[in-house]
Amino acid sequence: RHQTSCSTMARAKAPSPHFAYLWTTWIGTFLVLLKATCVIGSTSKPGGAGSALVFSDHVVKRVPFRGFPKEELTFEAWVSTSDYCNSGTLFSYAVESHSRDYMERQRAYNTFVAWNVNALIACHDFNYLMLVPDYYEGPPNYYQGCKTFYGDNLANFVDRKGTWHHVAITWNAKTNGTTRIYFDSLLISDVQTARTHALPDGGAFLIGGEQDCYGGCTESTQAFYGLMDEVRLWSVERTQKEIQQHMRNGHDITSQRGLVGYWKFDDASDSQGQPVDLKLARDASGNNNALTVKTYPVHAKANINGRFRANALEFSNNYAINTNVQDVPDKDVTIEFWAKTASLNTDKEGDVPAMYEFFSFATTLHGDGDTGNDGGHADSALLDDGILIEKYLTEYRGTNVFFSDMSTRGAVSVHINANREGNGGEYDSWIDFDTQWTDGEWHHIAVSWEYATGFTKLFFDGKEKKPFWKSSKGRVEDRAPAQGGVDPSISANVLRQNYGSLVLGQNQECVGGCFKSSTGLDGSLAEVRVWNRALDQAEIEKNMYMSFNDPPSDVQVYYKFDPSLDTSDNNALSTNHITRDMSAGRKNDLLLDSIAPTWVYSTAPLAGQDGMPLPEPTPGSSGYSLKLHDQQVAMVTNFEGFPSRAITVEFWMRSVDRCAQGTPVSYALGDYGVSDNAFLIVNYQSWGISIMEDEGTLLDHYAGVGATDGTWHHIAVTWESSSGKTILYDNGKPIWRVQRAKGATIPSGGTLVVGREQDCAGGCFDSNAGAVGNSSRGYAQEYGPQDFFGEIENLRIWRVARTEEDIVNGMLADSGLGDGKFDIPGVDASHPDLVAYWKFDEGAGYTAHDEKGHHHLHLSEDPEWVVVPWLSECGNGYVEGSEMCDDGNLIDGDGCSSSCQVESGWTCTGANPSICTKSSTPEGGGSSGADPHRTSGGSSHASSHEQGADQAAKGGKRSVKSWLGITVLSLAVLSVCVLGYMKREVIQDMFPEQYEWVAEKVETVISKVTPSPSRPMEGDAYAMLSLDAEDASTLSGPVSGHYSPPTQ
């Protein structure tokens, strides 16, 4: 995209000696005014396409769907995906079946499926979407597999750049099940499937996933990964002409025949630009067929076996979370709870997901800080399964991984101090118990673990059960309970941290996230307690039917799910759902949330009635991010001054790629195996680090944690030569500590590439065929493709190993919580330890400029700059953008209104959060007191506005003359900006060298006064890492209190 933006200034040559001083002064003044008027303190805005949804193993649904198309159907959408390794499902429609025959049920669940965006097929009423080999059976079905009918006439919607494409699928029962698929309105597939049964009404309609049971049982390998926008569903077969006429333009679309549903996904913000916590995607067709995006856990009453009445929390594709839980025992521990799930004793065996997740505590291995005494292992690693309790729903008997002749369905699995990925299997530790839990009743689960022995016990309804299957450091064994079972010891003497991230109802694959729709809990929990010792059987039987009003001191965490207590109060959580920790410490409240797609600004190529493209999103103070893929090379050659003895590399990234081992940063000096991996951060599926060819051993090669869940992650890597200590941070938390290249020196003058992995300096990229640049052939790729697919933002290189506090402060600054606050986010580019700093805020052109001025990134191909949402979020306790106040709630009548404006008769400070008091002056009210440290929100205006705020705090008023002067000056500035902007090309054509020289000089001056914008902030509906009041505290390790904001 080529566009002119206020934040883009030319850089060029020195002027000729004939250039007039007056002209220099005028154009310099114009540029200063233009920059000041256009940039400072702005919020971003969506373009004409509004918003889109980012899917990453997520679904949105309507269950049941009344009024679904019957004998004709058309499905349309704009999609953007680079996922070449999964069978991405656009949508599926399933009907309930009570048949005892498995194949009949599968046929019902495949009532209509649009499957595999790599080679798209649309299938109605098939047992198999694809069957190899498939045999001709003659009429009426001809073949069992749907794909057989399509042959080689298949549309591929996967694009390496993530380019948007329009998909249209039509089906007509009246013409022998004719199914057509259109790619950007061009007919690709035209088949007669002989499937002519009408589509039953009231089924389950899912976008983004394929159903293996009614309304769910989706699989990650068949999920859609990418963006989707402008989804329409019709009860008629649309013609190619109709598809062409309206694919980019929705004008008058609602008046046309047969429109059943129209989902624009443009509901992500309100009229004031505030992010909205969306539960539904509205239907623009007028038929009220809204799609469910989020569902929160709900409170319920539980009558447990007629002996105990308790409060419960019901889960369904959602969870309860605290990413900064504290005081979870690091040694001996007992976790107990009541749970209820659907019965497995039905004729529908197989119509369930693989697991139900109950309790997930993610933390890190304690370590001693010395990376040289661990025998090649990591000194500290992420234990995403620090404590994990889950239930098997599938049968492993008869498979090639389980050899005992017993059923695994209904067994309970326990992971202690575990991470099944990376680290040479050192922390692959789990143990399974024979509970035979297949009914749909309430049951009590208690798990105890002893630090010194590793003895792990499970009590089911108070009775101890035998373990039959386990892994200890990756060594797997099984033995039937009748034969004594397996040894109950796992993870003996492994010390975890006592703080981390706690989730009920889901399994964390990264800290506080990387959830899967296919593994959530569909059931209920009650009376969840964590004790700081291993309880014996007698204690468990005594306590299991009790609810504590005054819990014992050795109960560290306790959730009663009492709806009278689990209510939002007057703080930053006023718009969220929470459940209270009722232990004596009361530190670990849980936020209730849902597994859902992310809302982002859409860049789908829509058009107006005149056929002209709609406007693109407008950047705010955050600027842009850069989109990366294997069709782009971002490179700095001859990088002089690259850090040699200590380094920190940090950046923000977002990706939904599940295929490649993406490489964010590669610095190379020579050929393969010699110095191509001088400094390398690789594999965002399971992070690896190589420094001067030292990439560790099999014991510490990979971290076992990635960052490709579709949300923004801040990744940082630090290294110091003297000790070789290398630390990986994710969202400010150290999650992996290993040794690399002790005593080594990284030479200067190499080649830096962002987004591709070099096997020789400047090339030999490990890429798929067809990638841009000098790529290695497939057989020469040791690890397969290693290209980065996604977005990158705020990449910085430092010549020191930054501390955890430094990294967290940098994140806060990026997120509008630093010295520059909301209006001028980012770190100080003049810091002496900062070597290079790319904000990727250009918005146009083929260069990503280094804020230090030395190491500009050359972009080999036409780049795509992505506007990242930067919105003030009223109610988060921070005064941002156009807000006059923010007291941390959305309540009117307390001085700061629900729209964050000062109410009449009140005065509010500019502190974070605002403190509002009744005005004592006769005129009083409507004023905002100034905070001497505040530069956000109102500080985006001229300094006279700050002085006015001071006067308002004292009850004074600006004079009419002052306001008149300001008004006249503002109009003059605006006039100069408009005139100069309209004539910018004429001015540049008349005086090209002078214009560019002045622009460069003025830009230098402006950068010292108003640093360019860099970092967005997100509300729940947006994709940037949430750093609002309740979440910012999670970045700096354990902090006491209920989601208290960080100390400013």
Image: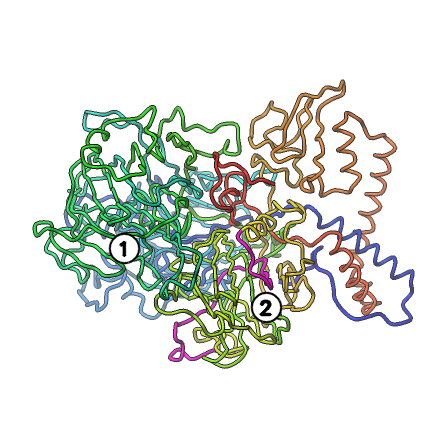
Q: What residue type is labelled 2?
A: Pro
Disc 1 + disc 2, Cβ < 8 Å: no
The residue where tag 2 is placed is 643
Q: What residue type is labelled 1?
A: Ser
Secondary element under disc 2, as helix, strand or loop, is loop
Q: Is residue 403 left or right of residue 577?
A: left
Q: In this view, does 108 lie to the left or right of 47?
A: left
Query: What is the spatial separation of the Cα atoms under label 1 and label 2, in whole angstroms?
Result: 39 Å
The residue where tag 1 is placed is 429
- Where is residue 183, by image quadrant? bottom left
Q: Which mark is residue 120?
A: none
Label 1 neighbour load within 10 Å: few <14, some 14-19, many 20+: many
Residue 74 appears in the figure: no
Q: Who is closer to the viewer here, 235 or 409?
A: 409
Q: Position of residue 27 (x, y in %)?
A: 84, 59
What residue is drawn where x is 35% and y is 61%?
Answer: 116
Q: In which quarter of the image is the C terminus?
A: top right
Q: Who is closer to the viewer here, 675 or 822?
A: 675
Report the magenta residues as a range: 775-804
Residue 117 appears in the figure: yes
Q: Who is closer to the viewer here, 250 or 132?
A: 132
